[in-house]
Image (cartoon, rainbow, N blue to C red):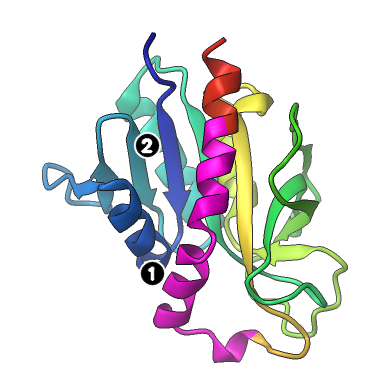
Amino acid sequence: MTETPICLVTALPAEAKPLNGHYGLIRDNSVNHTPLYRNRNMTLVVSGVGKKAAYDATSWLAQMLGAVQAVWVNLGIAGHPSRAIGEAVLASEILDGDDNGTWRATIPFEPPCATDRLTTLSGPDMGYRRPTLCDMEAAGFYAAALQYAPPDRIYCLKVISDNLLQPAVGINAKMVSRLIKDRLSLLDRLLLQLRVRNEH
């Protein structure tokens, strides 16, 4: 039985760094326009910041892989008014803050962490006015991935990096890498659930 391919999309090199170390992902130097890392069964692309960058990188990766029945995961940091720094949250609904697009996520298993709504914005919500997670990529990632995979193979996993008490101005690359690294065991559990579900 072949393993289900896993496609990871992060916005920042600091988000990708702990993933590369944990999963033994090696830089593919045949691709020079975007950072791409691989192992036998996993591919990670670093999209850059923003909804369009995430959309373009996800579409490019899907087209490069061809007709592969992969599981897609957008992993990265997000803000929230009150959730604790370092908490991992799986998006139950993705909202596009620019054009009011909405996608309800399909999570057909008991998630390994909390779930919440996620709003994608074109810039940080420094006032923390929205009662949702906030990022800058998920809506672009989700819209692109839906063209190549069904909803039950597309997930957005976010780690809280800032809140009203500890705002986004304090974020740096070292902090981002530590936040992601501290949640790799949870990502392992999520990927195991996805593999088991998609290989039966």
Quadrant containing the N terminus is top left
- Quarter of the figure with residue 89: bottom right
Looking at the rendered image, the disc whose residue lies closer to the viewer, 1 or 2, is 1
Q: Within the magenta stretch, is there residue 36?
A: no
Q: Position of residue 159 (x, y in %)?
A: 61, 64
Q: Which amino acid does label 2 sit on?
A: Trp
Q: Which residue is pictured at 31% across the width and 28% down the height?
A: 64
The 10 Å Cα crowd at callout 2, few under 14, some 14 to 19, many 20 or more, is some
Q: Can residue 21 be seen in this view?
A: yes
Q: Is 111 placed left or right of 148 in the picture?
A: right
User: Which numbered disc flags the more N-terminal residue, 1 or 2?
Assistant: 1
Quadrant containing the C terminus is top right
Which residue is denoted by mark 1 in the rendering?
A: 14
Question: Would you say the magenta stretch is mainly helix, strand or loop?
Answer: helix
Q: Viewer-proximal residue, 189 or 96?
A: 189
Q: Position of residue 49 (x, y in %)?
A: 47, 64
Q: Which residue is pictured at 26% across the width and 47% down the height?
A: 25
Q: Where is residue 97 in the image (x, y as percent from the top left)?
A: 76, 59
The residue range painted magenta reads 168-192
Q: Viewer-proximal residue, 112 or 141?
A: 112
Q: Which amino acid does label 1 sit on?
A: Ala
Q: Position of residue 191 (x, y in %)?
A: 52, 36
Contact between labelled residues 2 and 1, with CB atoms less than 8 Å apart: no
Task: Relative to 29, say whether 143 is above or below.
Answer: above
Which residue is denoted by mark 2 in the rendering?
A: 60
